Image: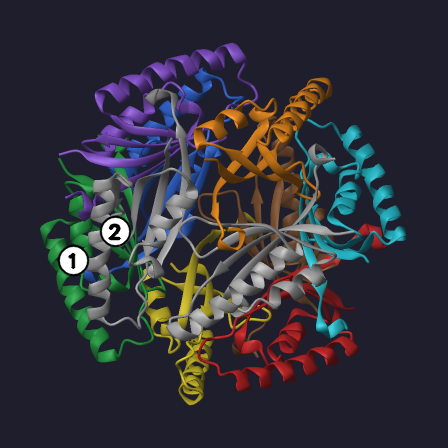
Chain colours: B orange, C purple, E cyan, F red, G brown, H blue, I yellow, J green
Amino acid sequence: MTNEYLVRIDVERPATVPDAEWDAVMAREAERARGYRRAGVIVRIWRIPGTRSNVGIWSAASASELHDKLSALPAHPYMKIDVQPLAQHYVEL
Amino acid sequence: MTNEYLVRIDVERPATVPDAEWDAVMAREAERARGYRRAGVIVRIWRIPGTRSNVGIWSAASASELHDKLSALPAHPYMKIDVQPLAQHYVEL
Amino acid sequence: MTNEYLVRIDVERPATVPDAEWDAVMAREAERARGYRRAGVIVRIWRIPGTRSNVGIWSAASASELHDKLSALPAHPYMKIDVQPLAQHYVEL
Amino acid sequence: MTNEYLVRIDVERPATVPDAEWDAVMAREAERARGYRRAGVIVRIWRIPGTRSNVGIWSAASASELHDKLSALPAHPYMKIDVQPLAQHYVEL
Amino acid sequence: MTNEYLVRIDVERPATVPDAEWDAVMAREAERARGYRRAGVIVRIWRIPGTRSNVGIWSAASASELHDKLSALPAHPYMKIDVQPLAQHYVEL
Amino acid sequence: MTNEYLVRIDVERPATVPDAEWDAVMAREAERARGYRRAGVIVRIWRIPGTRSNVGIWSAASASELHDKLSALPAHPYMKIDVQPLAQHYVEL
Amino acid sequence: MTNEYLVRIDVERPATVPDAEWDAVMAREAERARGYRRAGVIVRIWRIPGTRSNVGIWSAASASELHDKLSALPAHPYMKIDVQPLAQHYVEL
Amino acid sequence: MTNEYLVRIDVERPATVPDAEWDAVMAREAERARGYRRAGVIVRIWRIPGTRSNVGIWSAASASELHDKLSALPAHPYMKIDVQPLAQHYVEL
Amino acid sequence: MTNEYLVRIDVERPATVPDAEWDAVMAREAERARGYRRAGVIVRIWRIPGTRSNVGIWSAASASELHDKLSALPAHPYMKIDVQPLAQHYVEL
Amino acid sequence: MTNEYLVRIDVERPATVPDAEWDAVMAREAERARGYRRAGVIVRIWRIPGTRSNVGIWSAASASELHDKLSALPAHPYMKIDVQPLAQHYVEL
């Protein structure tokens, strides 16, 4: 029994973080996110045009499991995250 | 595996609904809500002071199951509902 | 070249619309939505738990084409619609 | 005569606080929060998925007593706190 | 042990309520409010200039007691009420 | 002829202000506020539970006089202030 | 000693008010407003382009006096009013 | 010397307006809007996808002239209008 | 042909700007603002009580000219500015 | 098949960026923006009076293409960008 969630992630880079450190975090972030995509944790994901933000459909057994996955993202300390739970729609039944 | 949700319900009575009809809906509503409390669907529930709104902790296997329970409330047509998913906090582990 | 959009639809039934009329509109609405799903206009769609609202991923060649599809929904007169354009995310490339 | 409150706490770590100092504050914070849980000051508490925020049910004789408990939290200087008073709901009577 | 609350009340008269009925409700409302003032339930109350809204300091043993007083107001069905709990300030100690 | 105002003050301590300097400002702030209380400039004042914010009833002949009193507060540079003018309510006449 | 206020007035005509009645209210409203302008109660007033709303500078000895003037406007039952108190600016001293 | 404005218009049809009357207003509205387009009052105009709202670039000598044009729209009684003044950008000089 | 605008200016001093530099900017700011007042660019201006913000009536031939005047203010880099265009009101005709 | 978008860009200069570096970025920004204007990527663009913000009409085949153009702006790291998709309006057909 899995739940699907609509997850919006806004990324804000503090002025005090030097380029090298930021690029390293972003590289690890990309790798982790691609892993989640292969594992089906990220079902679909899009870029909000003009921003560093993204919106995606995530899948997890529970909100606790989803929290663990999100907090494990390398760029998590720089993220504002909003999670909207999703129920099945009759059109998809 | 159950999920807990923070559910806020604001009830708005349209001016066009006569007293008798409203009271009947509220009676069926109270009965259904008490049933949910006994069954553990409603874990805790409180009144927002001064209003007809309530906030509560609900439990369900998934957002789809939660949706079915909420839509089955007799007063549902008069409700604005906001659902916040809840993850476990280390303090409760 | 198609564009994907995140579309949120809130449905509000005026107190003045009788049950029979509302049910007829909802039946035609369900039929149209299922048609869009088969045609790939609706890529995915979910119910916002506890509400009559939905959020979905829609696909169209342009915002004008998307507008025509949305305005053709039988329940359109009772809808508040928000459309967020989506760009490709590197994780999906 | 105790009052129950719905308390939302958002934690924001300033970029200027070094890791060692932050981890020390978080350790003292966890200890204090577990103490409040044992003493019934914190009735229930959950993590908002994807964030460092939490929402909980707190119990105190008055808003003044609640204020003292909240201000005594080691991480209080880094917190934005919102307190919603809760009244009894007929379903729980 | 009493609690003080900052209570904002916005009154909205539906277009469907005839003058005679409205005036009768307002008369009973004034009487009830003056009673609360004499009894110290309403500590202070002011009009928000230009509106039918008011803001006041109310006193009650608990949020549940405050809820009962507010719901007993004759004009309650036409009210939007916001309650902010108040703690003691060192300047008043 | 005096006017009463509902004044909300949110205090935000910049990360760059060292403890010693902050404590000195707070000490002068407490002294000034107590003086205003004795002089009736502050009629009543409460702490918003869990925060460094306060809400109070202030009295002044005019908004200009109120401005002078507020700007003279030692912690004023760290304050966000909202002033709501208050008119007499018939219940207090 | 007079106070100046920035007053925004939004006018909303309910669908249930027939033209004749509305036009009569608007005629009395215009007359009253011109009277206030001559008397200096309205110092300046402008139309928010595209709307029935206005924003103006009003003068009164107190918020209570301002409230009486605003409530005496014939169209007051159809108004949402916001009052911002104004203090003297050094540039005008 | 003309000014350009960004004008957003949201159209809301009250439930009490019958189809025939609404269609007649919309026909006159379309005619007036096309006239404005030919005259350069409307420089460009777009539909907000999924809604009856539009956003456009309007041109007028002053806000007063713009107000007259907007209020003369046949569907004006059913409109919420927001006007944003626009200054020249160096890229267009 | 001049236009009048309602201009709100919020001033926020960054923690990194030393007193001497800030005072120098403020001195030049006061001088420039007084010049604008004499020239009729600033028609009226008030202080928002308790804050460093102001609200004023400005006059300019166009939004472009207004922009130039506002950007030329010495404290402009520390300002958040909102400009509301104003149309003539029948009460002033 | 191109899409038009209403794009609002707010520019915020961090206190830590020295003048020389900022001016260099702004020079490259101006050059890039003029290039986009010549190429028809920027159809029209205006300054929001009193601010460093702009609003414009951009044209791109898709949201992904628009994202690439916006992210390539030299000042992009200092921008908050909002993109509103635009559909054709009957008045322009």
Residue at 88 percent across and 47 percent down: it is E35
Q: Is residue J57 visible?
A: no
To the question of a shared chain for discs 1 and 2, the answer is yes
Picture quadrant where residue F55 is located: bottom right
Helix, strand or loop under label 1: loop
* In the rendered image, the vertical position of residue F75 relative to residue I1, given as above or below: below
- The reply to whether the C-beta atoms of the residues labelled 1 and 2 are less than 8 Å apart is no
* In the rendered image, the vertical position of residue C26 relative to residue E39, given as above or below: above
Please give the chain letter of the residue carrying mark 1.
J
Report the residue marked by disc 1. J72
Please give the chain letter of the residue carrying mark 2.
J
Left or right of B88 on screen, residue G44: right
Looking at the rendered image, the quarter that the C terminus of chain H falls into is bottom left
Q: Report, in whole angstroms, how far the alpha carbon at label 1 lies from the one at label 2.
A: 17 Å
**Label placed on residue C79:** none
Residue at 32 percent across and 45 percent down: it is H58
Residue at 75 percent across and 44 percent down: it is E64
Check disc 1 and give the amino acid type.
Ala
Check disc 2 and give the amino acid type.
Gly
Mark 2, Cα crowd under 10 Å, few <14 / some 14-19 / many 20+, is some
Looking at the rendered image, the quarter that the N terminus of chain H falls into is bottom left
Residue at 28 percent across and 39 percent down: it is H45
**Which of the two labelled residues, at mark 1 and mark 2, occupies the earlier sequence position?**
2
Helix, strand or loop under label 2: strand
Report the residue marked by disc 2. J56
Q: Is residue I77 visible?
A: yes
Q: Position of residue H22 (x, y in %)?
A: 44, 21
Of badges 1 and 2, nearer the viewer stands: 1
- Asked whether G75 or F58 is in front, the reply is F58
